[in-house]
Image: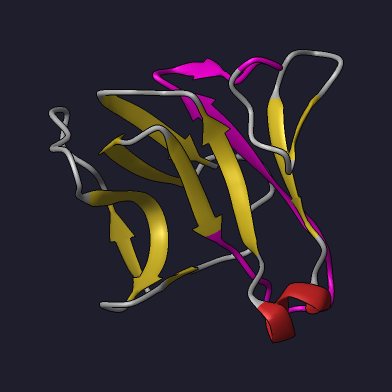
Amino acid sequence: VVDLESPYDLKSGVIYFDGEWVVWPEHARHGRDAIGYEDVLSLVYSSRSLKAVVSSEADQPYTVRITFNGDFLADENKGSYITIAANGESLLSVNGAQEVQHHRSYGLFKRQQSDQELELR
């Protein structure tokens, strides 16, 4: 487990981590049990849509908070697996052990172009 901090200036196509993570060339794992959304995975990307493969090593479901260029997603740009909470937060619910076997690919965004910044907390 390594405590990581991303630089201020993020480069396109590079995945950045803030907080405690275990990172391998093909995947990463959160390095601790977090209470809130203090640890972050950030990515600047250029595409019309974005998907993430997410799973859980435990049998417990968890929620990932997602921002786009510093703001929460809205109905017009959220992917099919994202829900918008009453307070406006955009959330991805990962259903624990179900994804361990299937490593589900989640659609996060749609209809975006040029370099955009994604944060998963």
- Percent x, y of residue 111: 48, 24
105 left or right, relative to 81: left
Residue at the spot 64% in from the left edge and 15% down from the top edge: 76
Q: Is residue 76 above or below residue 100?
A: above
**Residue at the extreme bottom:** 101
- Percent x, y of residue 55: 64, 70
Q: Which segment did they paint magenta?
A: 53-76
Q: Is residue 54 magenta?
A: yes
Residue at the spot 23% in from the left edge and 43% down from the top edge: 6
- Percent x, y of residue 59: 83, 77
Q: Is residue 108 magenta?
A: no
For the residue pair 50 and 10, the one nearer the viewer reads as 50
Number of numbered tags placed on the structure image = 0
- Percent x, y of residue 15: 27, 52
Image quarter in which the N terminus is found: bottom left
105 left or right, relative to 2: right
Q: Is residue 98 above or below residue 80?
A: below
For the residue pair 79 and 119, the one nearer the viewer reads as 79
Residue at the spot 63% in from the left edge and 53% down from the top edge: 106
User: Residue 42's image quarter?
Assistant: top left
Residue at the spot 86% in from the left edge and 15% down from the top edge: 86
Q: Is residue 69 above or below residue 96?
A: above
Image quarter in which the C terminus is found: top right
User: Residue 27's image quarter?
Assistant: bottom left
